[in-house]
Image (cartoon, rainbow, N blue to C red):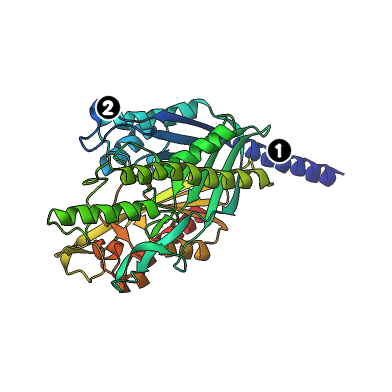
Amino acid sequence: MRSFFAVGFAALAIGNLHGAAAQVRQLKAGAAKVDVTPAPSELPKSYEGVFDHLYSRAIVLESGSASAALISVDAGAIPEPIWKSVTEQVEKDLGIPASHVLLTATHTHSAPMQQGPGYAQKIVESVRLAKQKVVPARIGYGTGVSYINVNRNIIDPKTKRWWEGPNYEGPSDKTVAVIKVEGLTGDPIAVYYNYAMHAVTVGQLDQVSADAPGTASKYIEDSLDDKVIALWSSGAAGDQNPIYFQQTFDLRDIRIKDYAKRGEDISNAMPPGGQGLNKNDPTVMKLMNQQKQMIQSMGQFLGEEVLHVMRSMERTQSDVPIDAVQKTISCPGRQRTDSGRAGYPGTYKDAPPVDIRLSLVKIGDIAIGGVNAEVFNLIAQRLKRESPYTATMMATLTNGMARSGYIPNDAAYGVYTFEVVSSRLKPGCAETSIVNGILDLLAESRDR
């Protein structure tokens, strides 16, 4: 009889321990956004105004004693000083370790590079507000597809050389990865979605814009009555463009012809923004207005797919651990000694090694691997194939800005696209080092 009671009490004690552990690991989450649009007086001379606003969006996740922050900023990139300042402040003021922060740029080409303590403080404020809103929550993962991206490297039919254009047969991952965060009653809190596409559609307007990432997030938020914060996460889009990009190609042709009349050949170069375009020309105005329409259309299409995945998601969890870790890898560097955008092999000399920062935030069985550079799509596809976690995604342009330029996959070094010839990395290192590096971080997190 004593042994029966002993077993009973032991079972009860174990049950209580499991219950206590689940209670300790109850997920909590909050989300917020802060406007980070520069004031008119802060705009560079090349900018002619604001088309739409820029935001820093943040999700704070807590589980037991662990916490993490996912941040998405409408910016071309996150300079190293800004990454360092934001993560240090988040750790000091909010208690979220710097290694547990993923600070991602949406990579819009229509945002001036912002720096300084005021800009960093706005990003920190989005995290602070998100932390203030944390409530018991559940999290889920799902995937959909969207066909608004396309591989952007083709053989030009006229020159027979590599150039930029829609390569419908080229490598391109159409996956939209979606993390949904909701309250225990099912009320939406946030959604973190990952897609591989350059945000370059309105880059020639010379106006501030969040481009398609901004219109997609706004569409999702509007559709859910602004009860949700929608964070775009830049997938491996180093060689991925919007599929509907013809207006940009047409404007480039106009620019090339206008420069040629003045005796300057820019056919194998590309001045930034809309430099050199006559924006009073009716044809130019029509094309630019179509670009404005295009980001609305692409935002709606991508936003609808994210909403579809959210609605279809049946499995969400509230008892999830949080773990995060970072490391730096290094690859041999090179410095280009000639010029030209694409179509010809570059010439190079040796340069110092290039450091690449890798990050991992794992929420239950959801793994987000971060790389602080522009990565070719096949590298992320390889990571997802080799990852032990089905719910794996790669967030690029995350946690600073490597000196690498583009990071092509190994096989891509055999073609003379502008991303490959401009890369500051020698071939044969980065692809495997990135994939294995993130896999090592996953293994390290599993062992803890």
Quadrant where the N terminus lies? top right
Q: Residue at x 63, y 40 (%)?
A: 318
331 in relation to 69, above or below: below
Q: Of marks 2 and 1, which one's residue comes earlier in the chain?
A: 1
Q: Residue at x 24, y 43 (%)?
A: 278
103 in relation to 226, above or below: below
Q: Nearer the viewer, residue 156 or 415?
A: 156
Q: Secondary structure at mark 2?
A: helix
Q: Nearer the viewer, residue 339 or 116?
A: 339
Tell me: 325 left or right of 263: right
414 in relation to 106, above or below: below
Q: Nearer the viewer, residue 207 or 254?
A: 254
Could you tell me the amino acid type at mark 1? Answer: Asn
Tell me: 25 left or right of 2: left
Residue that numbered label 2 is attached to: 40
Q: Quadrant of residue 93?
A: top left
Q: Quadrant of residue 128?
A: top left
Mark 1 surroundings within 10 Å by alpha-carbon count, few (fewer than 14), some (14 through 19), many (20 or more): few
Where residue 223 appears, x then y in whole percent? 58, 34
Q: Residue at x 27, y 57 (%)?
A: 404
Q: Which mark is residue 16?
A: 1
Q: Quadrant of residue 28?
A: top right
Could you tell me the amino acid type at mark 2? Answer: Pro
Tell me: 427 left or right of 227: left
Where residue 242 appears, x then y in whole percent? 43, 53
Cβ–Cβ below 8 Å for labels 2 and 1?
no
Mark 2 surroundings within 10 Å by alpha-carbon count, few (fewer than 14), some (14 through 19), many (20 or more): few
Where residue 82 appears, x then y in whole percent? 29, 38
Label 2 or label 1, whichever lies nearer to me, is 2
235 in relation to 35, above or below: below
